[in-house]
Image (cartoon, helix red, strand yellow):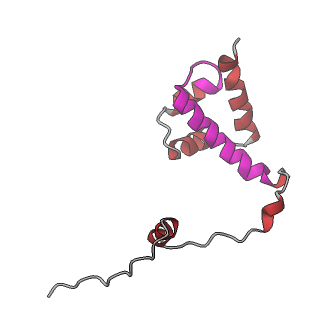
Amino acid sequence: MDDLSSRHQLFLAAQRRGELTLQQLWLRYIALTGTCAMIEIDAFLYGLGSLPAAEHDILAHALNERLDELYQASRVPYLAADLPAATPEDPLAILHQLLDRPPTPKEPPHSPD
């Protein structure tokens, strides 16, 4: 059995460790632009089918996000953990900062006469 054909076992173990039902995993996968049907995901998890490379990676990402949700507390902390939180800003102002140009003032919306 080659590495690619045995990968389904890693995915099935991650699904179980992530405490996800097939439906929950499939919804997470679809939310990340996955296109395979639930039955195709189920077949892959049990080694009865394969997934295209892109779909394989989307499913891996869905599982990794869930594992991060559950086990993030067990990660080793970074030294820069006290960085200030990002504040939402106007995307156009950020773009102007990146381009090193002063932002253009916003004009009020024109009202019909």
- The quadrant in which residue 109 appears is bottom left
Seen as rendered, the residue at the extreme front is 100
Q: Residue at x 79, y 62 (%)?
A: 80
Q: Nearer the viewer, residue 49 or 81?
A: 81
Q: Nearer the viewer, residue 71 or 21?
A: 71
| Rendered location of residue 95, percent (x, y) | 47, 66
Dominant secondary structure (helix, strand or loop) of the stretch shown in magenta:
helix
State the extent of the magenta-drawn residues as a range.
Answer: 44-72
Q: Residue at x 52, y 25 (%)?
A: 52
| Rendered location of residue 100, percent (x, y) | 49, 69
Q: Residue at x 79, y 68 (%)?
A: 82
Is residue 21 at least partly visible in the picture?
Answer: no
Q: Nearer the viewer, residue 21 or 63?
A: 63
- Quadrant of image for the C terminus: bottom left
Q: Is residue 45 magenta?
A: yes
Q: Is residue 84 left or right of residue 49?
A: right
| Rendered location of residue 73, percent (x, y) | 82, 55
Q: Residue at x 83, y 51 (%)?
A: 75
Seen as rendered, the residue at the extreme top is 1
Q: Is residue 52 magenta?
A: yes
